[in-house]
Image (tube, rainbow, N blue to C red):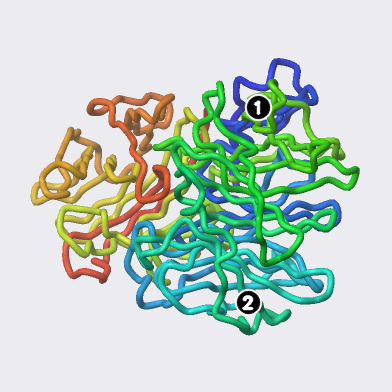
């Protein structure tokens, strides 16, 4: 895989070899938030020995349930996905924006790793593995039903097992509640119909209580749960001496005077030396839900507080820069972005919009490049429902992505190129028309022309040569496309395009090859992508 390029931060002289558009480790014993400037929504983290393992929501994108690894809580590597395909298979053969995997929890018990996740349309599932970087089991449907979300298992000191979850009003008509189930310790079934242990409808001014994470400390049962909504919410903590309640509550993290809106929903972890830390996300629209890390300590009254608490009232606010955790130094690392397609499998950064078909992509047809077949659109003139888009998360507030492509169209309407995808999307690519091959910049906005693509600009390109397609993303998600025949001299095309979020996720960037007819089939045309490079 290609190594990314060097950022402006950390300061000159920092001992770094890695180069990437965003690095949180400042090289001087401190880190900056966000730890990952990428869409790792609803994060959960578990420590096993000296290793930390993270997962996050993946919705309808495949592979799902990302598995990330770190030893210092700052530098993270994407090492696996626990969910190669969504179930039910047929249901997720087409994109279903905002559906699929919601708010997973990762735990370690009885020598195995467990990830519980909810599909709001089908119920609570889990997968497990002895090695988080290895093969995970097929999804097991533990509780069928609509509207069950954000599950978290808990094994008590006496061997009993429990599960808490929230509710999605859109599917169940219920929200703002946390439900507790008794569960078989091997997770084969739940043993009761569930009991409401926290009803935030009875708490004055509370709304959208969800995302519970279950812990035990000093004889107290703790539920960490966000409330107040994604954009402006806060992190709450509940505690009880009995697993069934009643629970006291306290708000322990909110925006305060900082620019970090809605800091909530995440994971409490400790270090071997006894430090405590809390991961949470922040919604940043085109960038999705980016990952922050807050210091956490326990007050004399027994409650935790996260971040900085300058007035000492027990409700913290996010830190932007802080001393790193007291953990052994780790090499600087970030999740992969660039790819030279030299391997035998796609890089872990890539995701399809639904369960893929084998014939869509090949790394063996022309070794050293990725061959994408031109897959037909299910609806003409729009890629909104296209499952075959191969995309990845925005990795930083500003970056440049460049794809090198050789195109071999088979019929009129075959296209291939570079795309920025969200509710609104744009692509720059090659298109076979009645009069031959041309370069086209196409845009599609949700509010215009019934979701059909509009030609924003075109250019004449020479036949039979590699074309370098580029998008420069600036702060705020403003995108400028450009192209080149030599990879050195780029010509801008069209005006700036504003990237937008999609359903519960940020904008994505990546590559595609499409055909105009015979929905679900391939045209016989194809594109070879020689490399995909992400730089600051």
The picture places residue 16, in percent across and down from the top left corner, at 73, 28
Relative to the observer, which residue lies in front, 334 or 501?
Answer: 501
Q: How crowded is mark 2: few (under 14 residues within 10 Å), some or many (20 or more)?
A: few
Dividing the picture into quadrants, the one containing residue 486 is top left
Is any part of residue 369 visible from this angle?
no
Q: Is 237 placed left or right of 269 in the picture?
A: left
Is any part of residue 476 visible from this angle?
yes
Residue position for label 2: 137
Relative to the observer, which residue lies in front, 82 or 156?
Answer: 156
The picture places residue 217, in percent across and down from the top left corner, at 81, 54
Q: Is 290 placed left or right of 504 in the picture?
A: right
Rounded to the nearest angstrom, the CA distance separating label 2 from label 1 is: 38 Å
Tell me whether the residue at label 2 lies in contact with that at label 1, contact meaning CB atoms closer than 8 angstroms: no
Up the image or down, 476 lies above or below 523; here it is above
The picture places residue 300, in percent across and down from the top left corner, at 83, 36
Residue position for label 1: 319
Relative to the observer, which residue lies in front, 144 or 133?
Answer: 144
Q: Image point 74% across, 64% down: which residue?
A: 242
Dividing the picture into quadrants, the one containing residue 454 is top left
The picture places residue 10, in percent across and down from the top left corner, at 68, 22
Q: Image point 52% across, 78% down: which residue?
A: 143
Q: Is mark 1 on a helix, strand or loop?
A: loop
Relative to the observer, which residue lies in front, 415 or 162?
Answer: 162
């Amino acid at each position: 895989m290609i190594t990314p390029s060097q950022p402006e931060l950390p300061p000159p002289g920092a001992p770094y070899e890695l180069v990437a558009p965003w690095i949180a480790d400042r090289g001087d014993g401190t880190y900056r938030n966000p730890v990952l400037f990428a869409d790792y929504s609803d994060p959960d983290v578990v420590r096993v020995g000296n290793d930390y393992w993270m997962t996050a929501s993946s919705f309808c994108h495949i592979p799902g349930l990302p598995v990330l690894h770190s030893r210092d809580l700052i530098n993270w590597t994407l090492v696996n996905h626990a969910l190669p395909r969504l179930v039910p298979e047929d249901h997720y053969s087409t994109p279903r924006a905002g559906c699929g995997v919601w708010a997973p929890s990762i735990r370690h018990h009885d020598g195995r790793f467990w990830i519980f996740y909810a599909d709001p349309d089908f119920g609570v599932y889990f997968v497990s593995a002895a090695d988080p970087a290895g093969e995970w089991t097929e999804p097991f449907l533990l509780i069928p039903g609509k509207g069950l979300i954000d599950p978290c298992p808990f094994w008590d000191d006496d061997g009993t097992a429990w599960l808490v979850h929230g509710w999605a009003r859109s599917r169940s008509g219920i929200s703002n509640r946390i439900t507790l189930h008794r569960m078989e310790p091997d997770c084969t079934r739940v043993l009761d119909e569930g009991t409401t242990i926290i009803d935030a409808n009875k708490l004055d001014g509370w709304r959208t209580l969800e995302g519970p994470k279950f812990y035990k400390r000093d004889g107290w049962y703790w539920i960490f749960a966000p409330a107040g909504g994604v954009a402006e919410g806060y992190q709450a903590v509940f505690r009880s001496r009995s697993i069934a309640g009643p629970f006291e509550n306290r708000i322990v993290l909110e925006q305060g005077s900082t620019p970090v809106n809605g800091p909530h929903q995440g994971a409490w972890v400790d270090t071997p030396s006894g430090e405590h830390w809390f991961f949470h996300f922040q919604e940043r629209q085109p960038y999705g839900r980016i990952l922050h890390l807050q210091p956490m300590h326990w007050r004399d009254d027994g409650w935790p507080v996260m971040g900085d608490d300058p007035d000492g009232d027990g409700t913290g606010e996010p830190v932007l820069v802080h001393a790193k955790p007291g953990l052994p130094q780790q090499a600087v690392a970030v999740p992969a972005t660039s790819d030279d397609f030299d391997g035998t499998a796609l890089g872990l950064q890539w995701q399809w919009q639904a369960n893929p078909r084998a014939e869509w992509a090949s790394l063996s047809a022309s070794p050293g490049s990725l061959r994408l077949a031109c897959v037909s659109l299910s609806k003409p003139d729009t890629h909104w429902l296209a499952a075959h888009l191969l995309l990845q998360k925005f990795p930083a507030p500003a970056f440049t992505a460049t794809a090198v492509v050789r195109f071999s169209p088979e019929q009129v309407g075959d296209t291939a190129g570079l795309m920025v995808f969200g509710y609104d999307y744009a692509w720059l690519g090659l298109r076979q028309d009645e009069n031959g091959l041309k370069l086209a910049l196409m845009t599609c906005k949700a509010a215009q022309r019934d979701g059909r693509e509009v030609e924003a600009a075109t250019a004449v390109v020479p036949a039979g040569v590699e074309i370098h397609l580029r998008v420069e993303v600036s702060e705020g998600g403003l995108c400028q496309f450009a192209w080149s025949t030599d990879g050195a001299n780029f010509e801008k095309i069209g005006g700036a395009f504003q990237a937008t979020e999609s359903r519960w996720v940020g904008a994505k960037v990546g590559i595609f090859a499409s055909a105009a007819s015979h929905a679900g089939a391939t045209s016989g045309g194809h594109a070879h992508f020689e490399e995909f490079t992400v730089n600051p």
